Amino acid sequence: MLRPTEQTTSTLQLVATDMSDIMENLDTRELHLDDGQYDTPDTNHTEARKGFSAVYDTVAFKESEARVFLSAPVTAKILEVERFTSAQDRFDITAQRSVNKSLPAVFKIELRHGEFSWVVKRKEKHFMELHRELLRYKTFMKIPLPSHSHTVRRHTVKRAEARQIPTLPRGGGDELAREEQVSSRRKQLEDYLNKLLQMSMYRNYHATMEFIDVSQLSFIHDLGPKGLEGMIQKRSGGHRIPGLNCCGHSKMCYRWSKRWLVVKDSFLLYMKTDSGAISFVLLVDKEFNIKMDSKDTETKHGVRIDSLSRNLVIKCSSYRHARWWGQAIEQFVQKHGAAFLTDHRFGSFARQNDNVPAKWYVNGRTYMADLADALEEAKEEIFITDWWLSPEIFMKRPVVEGNRWRLDHILKRKAQQGVHVFVMLYKEVELAIGINSEYSKRTLMHLHPNIKVMRHPDHVSSSVYLWAHHEKIIVIDQSVAFVGGIDLAYGRWDDREHRLTDVGSVSRSVALETDSDPSNMVAPSNGAGAQSRAAVVMDSEDQPKLKGQGRLRKTRFSLRRHLQKHGLAHADSVSSVESTKEESDSVPSLNTGMGELVGDTRFWHGKDYCNFVHKDWVQLDKPFDDFIDRHTTPRMPWHDISSVVHGKAARDVARHFIQRWNFTKIMKPKYRSLSYPYLLPKSYTTAHELRYQVPNCVPAKVQSNSPPATVPGAGRDPGKAGRLTPETRARSGLASPPHRIVATDTAPQETPARGAHEATPNERDRETGRAPRFRRRRREGDGATAPPAAARAQPRFAPQPDRPSP
C-alpha cells in the first residue's frame, strides 16, 4: 500500500533537485496567473483610465493582483546611443560622441503608453539579464508540479494560441566599435522590446516592469505625468523634525533599505516592494534641492534630495546612474512643479488662481446644506479637519428625512461606497476644554474601516499647551474645498433669524389624490374643503429620541411671554408649546422644498441647543439629551462666515491637509501602521476636470493664503512676536502655516440680521484657551495694509431688503 506513495515522493524529489537553480531565483507568488493570461491580452483587467482610488489598493510587486497597465499598447523607441571618451564628459551634452571602445554604450529608450511617455536608459547587459530571467520564467511554467491550479494553467496554455518568447539576437556586447554596428544593434533591441511588450504574460512579469520603470502608481490619471521611477537604496534618518533621527551621525547609525522611488510633478515617494505600501512622501517646496557631490551625500554614487521636512539620501549603482537620476529629478520638477519652488504673495506656497468658481457663506444654514450635497457627490476621498467635530449634527434642517442628512450617516454611507474618509481633530487639554474629541474619534472610527481619524497634538510629549489647531477645512476629491470659520459641531448651525428658542417639533403634510382611501386621510386643521385635505405624516420613525419631547411642561417663567412683553418676539424666531395652545385653529407652516411643514419646528436637537455662556457642554456621549432647559434658557446664536472654492485652489487646500496628515503620521507612533496610509496630492494638470460644482458660484481670483501663525508662548523669534519659528511649526504639524482663503470679486450668499452676534477675537480665544486680548483699531496710515481695489469697491455685506440698514 505504501509503494506507490514512495514512488511518487521520489519522483517529486528528483524534479525538485533538477530545478533547484530555477527555484532559488523565483518567487512562487509570481506564478499565480489567471487562466488564459499566459499568452492572451489581459483585456479583462485593464482600463482606459485608472481611478485615483488605486493608490489605496497597492499590493506587493510580485503579486498577480498588481494592476499596472492600461488598455492601450506599450511602444518603445530607442532615441539614441550614448558613448563617451571619459568620465568627465559623460553628462556634457556638448561633448563630441566617440567611437572609442573603452566605455559601454547606453541606449536611451522612449516609451509610450496611452497619454503617458517617459525615458529610460539601459545597457545591453540589462537586455541580456531580462531575457535570461524571462527564459527561466517560461521554463518554470513547463514543470508538471502536482498542483491543481498549476495543472489547469498548463492545460490552458496548451489550448490557447501558442506564442514563443521573442528571440534576442546575439550582439557584440556593450562595446560597439563601428557606427554600422550601433545602428544595427539599436534596431534589433528596439524590435525585441516591442514584441515583448505586446505579450501580456511577459509584460506583466515583475522583471519586465522593473526594466521599463513602471509600477502600480505610474499610470494614474490624477497623479499627473509619469516621472522617473526605479529601484534605489535609501538611507535612514535625515528628518528635520526633532526626535525622529538617531542621536549619532556616524555610518554605524545609518541603515540602507531597498525601495522603489516614484517621482511626480509636485512630490516624490518610495514604496516597499514586498508589500507595495507607500513608506514616505516628500512634497516639493521652496527649499527643494538636488545635490550629487560626495561631500553632501557622504556616500559613493549618492544623490541628496533636500526639502523643508527632510534631507533624503539615496544610493545608486554607479556614478553614471547617480548623475542621471539627480539631473532627471531636477529637470522634471523644474518643468512640472516650478510653482512650488518659490514663495508667492503673502509668503504663501500657493499662487493666485483666476476664474476659480467660488462662493461665500454667512451663517451655517446654507453652508452646511451645500456641504452635505457636496459630500454626497464624493467618489474617492473626503478630508475633514476641525477644532471640534460633533458626529451627530444634522446638516439640513428642519429634520424631515430622518437621519439621512446627519453627518455620521453621510460619512458612513460614503465609506460603504468605497470613499476614503480622513479626519484630523484637535486633541484638547481635557481639564481646560470639554469638547471630548476622543468620543468623536471613537464614534467615527466605529462606522466603517474606510474612515480614519487622527488627533493632534500630544500636549505632554510636545510640551505645548496654549495653542490649538483651529482650522475648519473640508475637501472633497481634492476638487472642492470648504474653508472658513464654521465647525461641524454643536451650536454652529444658524440662519439669518438667529432664533433664541426652540421647543417644538416638526411634521410634514403630503397632499393626496381626491380619489384616495378616506381612511388614510386626516381632516386639515384649518377647515379647508375636501379637495385641499391633506394627511399629516409624522417623521418619527427615524427621528432621534429626544429627552422631554412631546411632553408639556409647566414653568414659572415663560420666555415667550417675556419676549412679547418687551416687543422682542418674532413670528419665526419663537417656537413654543404655548403657541400651539393659543393658536390651535391656525397651524403655522413652512415651505422648505421637502413638502409643506406644519406645527412647531425644532431645529436644534439635544446638545445642539446650547448656551455656552450659561453652561458648558457636558455628557457629549449622549448627543440627544438636553443639557439646558429650553423653556427657561435662550440659546446662544452663532454667526460666522465660510467659503467654497474649486479646481486649483481646492488642490492647494488639499495639499495643506495632506502635509498635516503625513506629518502627524510620522510624529505619532500609533499612526505609523499601514492602516493609516500616506496621502498623495493630485496633479494640478487635472484640476480643471470638475465632476461636481457647488451651485451659484461666481468666478473669482483666489489664493490659499498661509499667514504666519500667532501661537502664544512657543518658539517666537526675537523681533517677530507672535510668529512661529520653523522648529515650533514643525512640532505643531504646520510645515506650512494655517490656511485661509483670500478672494475678491465675490459676494456673500446670506446676509446677517441686524444685531446678529459675530464671533469676536476674545470669543475665538475662548476656544483656543488663550487669555483675552485687547486690540486698538488702526487708522489708515497706522501700519494697516489697504485692501485690494476690487475689495474696496464692493461693500462687504449688502443691506437686507426686509430690514433697515444698520
Image: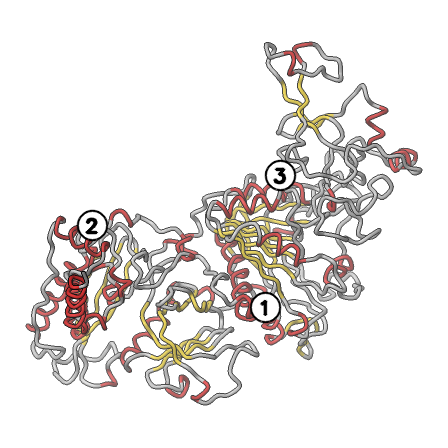
Q: Earlier in the sequence, mark 3 or mark 1?
A: 3
User: What mark, if any, has residue 36 been given in the picture?
Assistant: 2
Crowding near pointer 3: few (<14 within 10 Å), some, many (20+)?
Answer: many
Residue 803, placed above or below residue 326: above
Q: Earlier in the sequence, mark 2 or mark 1?
A: 2
Disc 2 secondary structure class:
loop
| Amino acid type of the residue tagged 2 in the rendering | Gly
Q: From the top left corner, tell me how far across and down residue 162 is, in percent.
A: 11, 53
| Amino acid type of the residue tagged 3 in the rendering | Asn
Assess whether mark 3 and mark 2 are in contact (beta carbons under 8 angstroms): no
Foreground of the two, 129 or 592? 129
Disc 3 secondary structure class:
loop
Looking at the rendered image, the quarter that the C terminus falls into is top right
Q: Viewer-nearest of labels 2 and 1? A: 2
The residue that appears at 73% across and 45% down in the rendered structure is 608
Q: In this view, does 208 lie to the left or right of 453?
A: left
User: What mark, if any, has residue 38 been given in the picture?
Assistant: none
The residue that appears at 65% across and 32% down in the rendered structure is 541
Q: Which residue position is annotated with label 3?
A: 403
Q: Is residue 483 left or right of residue 133?
A: right
Crowding near pointer 2: few (<14 within 10 Å), some, many (20+)?
Answer: many
Q: From the top left corner, tell me how far across and down residue 161 is, in percent.
A: 12, 49
Q: In this view, does 450 lie to the left or right of 36?
A: right
Quarter where residue 109 is shown: bottom left
Residue 190, placed above or below residue 801: below
Q: Is residue 563 left or right of residue 423?
A: right
Q: From the top left corner, tell me how far across and down residue 748 is, in percent.
A: 64, 44
Q: Which residue position is annotated with label 1?
A: 733
Q: Is there any visible trace of residue 618 in the rendered image?
A: yes
